[in-house]
Image (cartoon, rainbow, N blue to C red):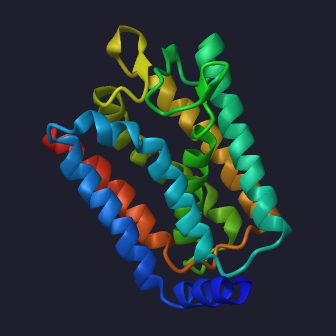
Amino acid sequence: MYSKLTNTLQFIQSRPAIGIVILSAFYFFGIIGIQSEAAKWFIEKTAFNLLLSLVILLTYQQTFNFRLWIGFLFCYFIGFFAEYLGVTYGILFGSYEYPDTLGIQWNGVPVIIGVNWFLLTFCIWALMRKTSFSPAFLIIPATILTVLVDILIEPVAISLNFWQWENNTVPLQNYVGWGFISFLIFSFYALIRIPTDNKIYWALLAWQIIFFASLNFLL
């Protein structure tokens, strides 16, 4: 049984197209489903989709070592702590709150939110590392790109009730906060030299952008 599971996993890992097809199906039908009469059902599966995206991303990660896991934990906890400060005290991002749309919460913050921070920052950092520049010179461009993606995310997140801002207005402070936290995360990635040799990161990043860009237009 163990041998059969191992062989199946090796088969999947050797064929990135499988992961790309699964990601594409979930994000594509998510776009379609959110505009249908079953929108509530699709929206409620957002946390599952983020978790599935993480599993697929890690399945096609070619280097697993301490630097990868410490990078993940740093990103998860600094992202989660930043959200906790935002929800509880209005620090960093402004005054907002999370409904229960994104699933299980701790002190008003969905536990899946740290995964969301990792998925976005890891994929952007993997993209940046494809250039010939030193990691130190990639921190600022990576930070700017992350903030630009958040600009796409915010209107959709409000419409789908992922989170809600005071007065239903996204403050400039939010984007400054995103830039600050992203800068810290990317600085840490550069410091520890997190491995980014991943076969499907580009597809996940592309679908995240397509998902939010499409819903900005369609909703």
Q: Is residue 217 visible?
A: yes
Q: Residue at x 76, y 74 (%)?
A: 64
Q: Residue at x 66, y 23 (%)?
A: 84
Q: Residue at x 40, y 75 (%)?
A: 20
Whether residue 98 sits left or right of residue 7 in the image: it is left
Q: Quadrant of the N terminus?
A: bottom right
Q: Position of residue 49 (x, y in %)?
A: 45, 51
Q: Is residue 103 above or below residue 167?
A: below
Q: Please identify the quarter of the rendering in which residue 21 is found.
A: bottom left
Count of number-bearing discs: 0
Q: Quadrant of the C terminus?
A: top left
**Which residue is at the front of the view, 54 or 154?**
54
Q: Please identify the quarter of the rendering in which residue 180 is found.
A: top right
Residue at the top extreme, as displayed: 167
Q: Please identify the quarter of the rendering in which residue 190 is found.
A: bottom right
Q: Is residue 128 visible?
A: no
Residue at the front extreme, as displayed: 1
Residue at the right extreme, as displayed: 66
Q: Position of residue 112 (x, y in %)?
A: 58, 40
Whether residue 151 sits left or right of residue 192 in the image: it is left
Q: Residue at x 41, y 19 (%)?
A: 164
Q: Position of residue 97 (x, y in %)?
A: 50, 17
Whether residue 37 sits left or right of residue 23 in the image: it is left
Q: Is residue 47 above or below residue 104?
A: below
**Which residue is at the front of the view, 214 or 35?**
35
Q: Position of residue 163 (x, y in %)?
A: 43, 25
**Which residue is at the front of the view, 187 or 99?**
99
**Which residue is at the front of the view, 158 or 178?**
158
Whether residue 63 sits left or right of residue 105 in the image: it is right
